[in-house]
Amino acid sequence: MTFDFESLPPSHRYRILASLVTPRPIAWVTTVDSEGRPNAAPFSFFNVFGSNPPLVAFAPGNKDRHTPKDTARNIRTNREFVIHLVDEPLGEAMVATAATLPHGENELAHLQVTTRPGDKVAPPRIIEAPVALECTEHSTLEIGTNRLIIGIVHLAHVRDGMMDENGYLKEGTYAPLARMASPDWYARTTDQFEIPRPD
Ligand SMILES: Cc1cc2nc3c(=O)[nH]c(=O)nc-3n(C[C@H](O)[C@H](O)[C@H](O)COP(=O)(O)O)c2cc1C
């Protein structure tokens, strides 16, 4: 089977790519608007792209041709965000924050999660998340209706007991959820194994 992307509508292309380029990590992103009101939303067009400087990127598509999602709009305003990685107990809360709410309404308000202000940035940090990365915007590329938000990580909060001081994970302590086929499939990452590299 072959799909010719030049003759397919964007929704069809999305389905194909989002279902095939898997598993993807999920960035659960908190931001604040110009009045300091918090916002949270998940984005699986997300990854890390370097360590010097520590670079991450994620991609909120526009709501329509010219209107950014609240996350992108807030980052355009104050250039700060916190990316959380999510494990299975937080899965439903994370998905609940994908609801489309009016700008300024806090997706976290009705959830059983605890937040605390970031140490270096204004957006709140979700305490239950195994990982929270405090970031500032480096730049945003606008390509069609995609926005590729590139961020610099300033601080990584890691759940106690998960990592040693040198940054090595302790075996069996971290199993982030992975995004699978569109629209609603996920995978556990509890079945992990090693393949040693050649010398
Ligand atoms: C697991 C998951 C991953 C998602 N990934 C993306 C993504 O990469 N890009 C995107 O534009 N929307 C993505 N969405 C949809 C957004 O989370 C949704 O549009 C949300 O309402 C945006 O919120 P905001 O307007 O507060 O920024 C995803 C939804 C879920 C549940």
Image: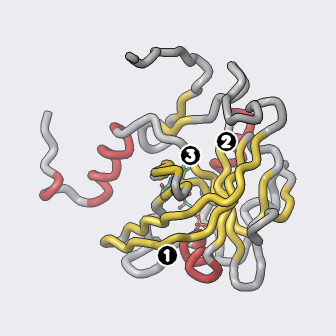
Crowding around mark 3 (Cα neighbors within 10 Å: few <14, some 14 to 19, many 20+) is: many
Residue at which label 2 appears: 86
Q: Label 1 amino acid?
A: Pro
| Whole-number angstrom distance, CA of label 1 to CA of label 2 | 24 Å
| Whole-number angstrom distance, CA of label 1 to CA of label 3 | 19 Å
Q: Label 2 amino acid?
A: Val
Residue at which label 3 appears: 26
Give the mark, 1 or 3, whose residue is nearer the N terminus: 3
Cβ of mark 3 under 8 Å from ligand 1: the answer is yes
Q: Quadrant of the N terminus?
A: top left
Marks 2 and 3: in contact by CB < 8 Å?
Answer: yes
Q: Is residue 114 above or below residue 1?
A: below
Q: Secondary structure at mark 1?
A: loop
Along the line of sight, the residue nearer the viewer: 175 or 88 = 175
The residue positioned 33% from the left and 52% from the top of the image is 14
Snapshot quadrant of residue 167: top right
Residue at which label 1 appears: 68
Whole-percent x, y for residue 47 in the image:
49, 48
Give the mark, 1 or 2, whose residue is nearer the N terminus: 1
Residue closest to the far front: 199
Which tag is nearer the camera, tag 1 or tag 2?
A: 2
